[in-house]
Image: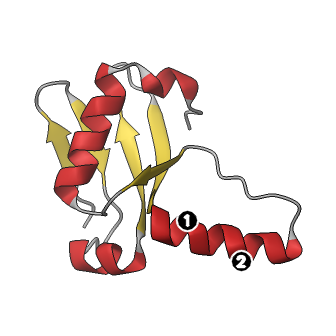
């Protein structure tokens, strides 16, 4: 079952993947979510910790010229609370306009 969390202040919905388990995401250091804005636009975000990002970049640069992920956001820890706070911050500060929607 897909988990949908609505931030009541902004009417933004965060759609977590099927089978989302917070503890697993904390250990992995990343999570991909979808965000549904009140205007109907959907954004797919990759939320990652700095430690995991460092690993991803190091691994990627072995065989590639660069590391690039659209809609990549770095936070300190992958938890539902941090993700809700992040999405609320992005929405209130008009940051979704700088991202690619689905």
Q: Residue at x 34, y 80 (%)?
A: 27
Q: Secondary structure at mark 1?
A: helix
Q: Secondary structure at mark 2?
A: helix
Q: Is residue 76 visible in this depiction of the protein? A: yes
| Rendering quarter of residue 40 | top left
Identify the mark nearer the N-term, 2 or 1.
Answer: 1
- Taking the view exactly as shown, the residue that stands out farthest to the left is 8
Can you say whether 16 is above or below 88 in the image?
below
Image spot of residue 30 (x, y percent): 43, 67
The answer to whether residue 27 is left or right of residue 12 is right
Q: Nearer the viewer, residue 65 or 8?
A: 65
Check disc 2: other Cα within 10 Å, few if <14, some if 14-19, many if 20+.
Answer: few
Task: Say which quadrant the C terminus sits in.
Answer: top right
Q: Nearer the viewer, residue 54 or 20?
A: 54
Q: Are marks 2 and 1 in contact (CB under 8 Å)?
A: no
Q: Residue at x 59, y 33 (%)?
A: 100
Image spot of residue 6 (x, y percent): 17, 40
Can you say whether 60 is above or below 38 in the image?
below
| Rendering quarter of residue 37 | top left
Using the numbered discs, state the Cα–Cα distance from disc 2 to disc 1 in whole angstroms: 10 Å
The answer to whether residue 4 is left or right of residue 35 is left
Task: Say which quadrant the N terminus sits in.
Answer: bottom left
Can you say whether 40 is above or below 85 in the image?
above
Q: Nearer the viewer, residue 45 or 57?
A: 57
Q: Which residue is mark 2?
A: 59
Q: Which residue is mark 1?
A: 53
Image spot of residue 101 (x, y percent): 55, 33
The answer to whether residue 48 is left or right of residue 84 is right
């Amino acid at each position: 079952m897909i988990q949908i969390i609505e931030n009541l202040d902004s009417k933004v919905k965060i759609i977590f993947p099927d089978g989302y388990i917070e503890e697993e995401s904390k250990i992995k250091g990343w999570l991909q979510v979808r965000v549904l804005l009140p205007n109907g636009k959907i954004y797919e975000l990759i939320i990652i910790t700095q430690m995991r990002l460092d690993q991803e970049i190091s691994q990627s640069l072995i065989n590639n010229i660069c590391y690039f992920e659209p809609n990549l956001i770095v936070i300190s820890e992958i938890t539902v609370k941090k993700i809700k706070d992040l999405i609320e911050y992005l929405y209130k500060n008009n940051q979704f306009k700088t991202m690619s929607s689905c």
